[in-house]
Amino acid sequence: MIDFTAYPVGTSGTLTGSVGSIDWTLTSSRGEIRAPEACTSPVPELACVNDGLGISGSEISGNSKDYIQIVFSRNVALVATWFLDLFIARDGSNAEIAYVSKGTPSGVPDVTVVADKVYPGGNGYRKAEGFRLIGTTFSFFVDPDGNDNLGRPDAALAAVEIAPVPLPAAGMLMLGALGGLAVLNRRRQRTA
């Protein structure tokens, strides 16, 4: 798991890191990531030092232009994501919604994460799992129409979980065949 809530309050800019031999870079549509607020309610599985990552403020605002994007050095399987500050309107008439897409947001998102807590009711923690998106680039953004009716639609990215993507069996067979051909070629050169 890459836990973005473990970064110190006040962290900003482009974030980088690695999971094993896989490097990653986190940026936003505006170029800067921010973690300006302290976490006020403990969250299962997360460090909860900060209240998640946002863009230019404490959250990703729900408009068609704001998104956080993570780019990995090779294909990975994104298998879970955590958001904070996703809430349902007190009267139940509306809810904040976060999305995950492969690549840059366009068209229908690949994963939809709907709020399941009413504000004020903790930190709006929501984990989405049970999906497997394979790629190098993933974007996280908020629905401009989903809202808790208390302010603007927004949410903070808290964490992601990835799994390695093994080379296909055909790729391994091809590598083995090429290695075999190289050995045969060397033997022929020695006897000639």
Image (cartoon, helix red, strand yellow):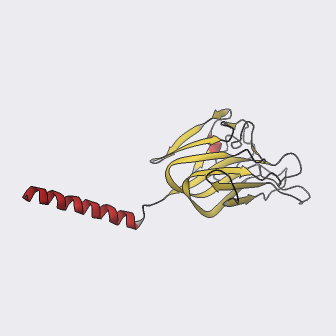
Going by the picture, which residue comes out furthest to the front? 192
Instruction: Kindly indicate the quadrant of the structure image that contains residue 179.
Output: bottom left
Q: Residue 43: in sight, yes or no?
A: no
- Residue 6 in sight in this render: yes
Q: Position of residue 160 (x, y in %)?
A: 61, 52
Q: Position of residue 180 (x, y in %)?
A: 23, 63
Q: How many marks?
A: 0
Q: Tell me if residue 65 comes above or below residue 145 in the rendering.
A: above
Q: Position of residue 191 (x, y in %)?
A: 7, 59
Query: At x 79% / y 50%, what residue is drawn?
Result: 122
Q: x, y percentage for residue 142?
A: 75, 51
What residue is drawn where x is 63% and y is 44%?
Answer: 4
Determine the image quadrant of residue 77.
bottom right
Q: Is residue 98 left or right of residue 77?
A: right
What is the quadrant of the C terminus in the image?
A: bottom left
On screen, residue 176 versus residue 34, left or right, reads: left
Most extreme residue toward the left is 191
Nearer to us in this view, 191 or 148: 191
Residue 135 position by quadrant: bottom right
Residue nearer the viewer, 54 or 187: 187
Query: Relative to 162, is 176 above or below?
Result: below
Q: Residue at x 67, y 53 (%)?
A: 82
